Amino acid sequence: MYQERSGIWDELAGKWKQFRGEVRKQWGQLTDDDFQYVAGNRDKLIGRLQERYGIAKEEAESQVDKWFNGLKF
């Protein structure tokens, strides 16, 4: 499914500042430095979620995909 939506992730990266609030609501443990590092990149977001929440990559991917699929563009 990610492959199909990768172009939309490019769009999200371009609008990252607009979506930061939504990300912060979902994952409140992310810091401002994390947001700057991630900058709308799916893989970087997954990595930071693994670090901050101590979860497996598969769980982080599942959470990100679920969150992303609920976004309104």
Image (tube, rainbow, N blue to C red):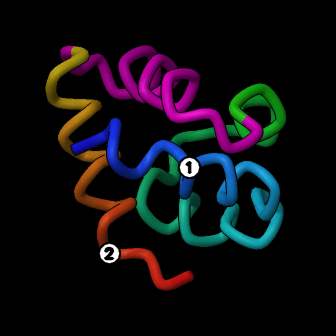
Q: Quadrant of residue 62?
A: top left
Q: Amino acid at mark 1?
A: Gly
Q: Which residues are magenta?
A: 39-56
Relative to residue 36, is residue 67 drawn left or right?
left
58 lies above or below 35: above
13 lies above or below 39: below
The residue tagged 2 is 70
Give me the disc on residue 68. none
Q: Is residue 1 magenta?
A: no
Which residue is painted at 76% across and 39% down in the image? 39
Which residue is painted at 56% across and 70% down in the image? 22
Q: Quadrant of residue 33?
A: top right
Depth check: give the residue in front, 49 or 64. Answer: 64
Q: Position of residue 53 (x, y in %)?
A: 34, 27
Which residue is painted at 52% across and 42% down in the image? 29
Depth check: give the residue in front, 30 or 57. Answer: 57
Q: Position of residue 44 (x, y in %)?
A: 57, 22
Quadrant for the N terminus in the image? top left
The residue tagged 1 is 7
Q: Alpha-carbon distance for marks 1 and 2?
A: 16 Å
Q: Quadrant of residue 14?
A: bottom right
Residues at badges 1 and 2 in contact (C-beta under 8 Å)? no
52 lies above or below 56: below
Which residue is painted at 66% across and 47% down in the image? 10
Dominant secondary structure, magenta: helix
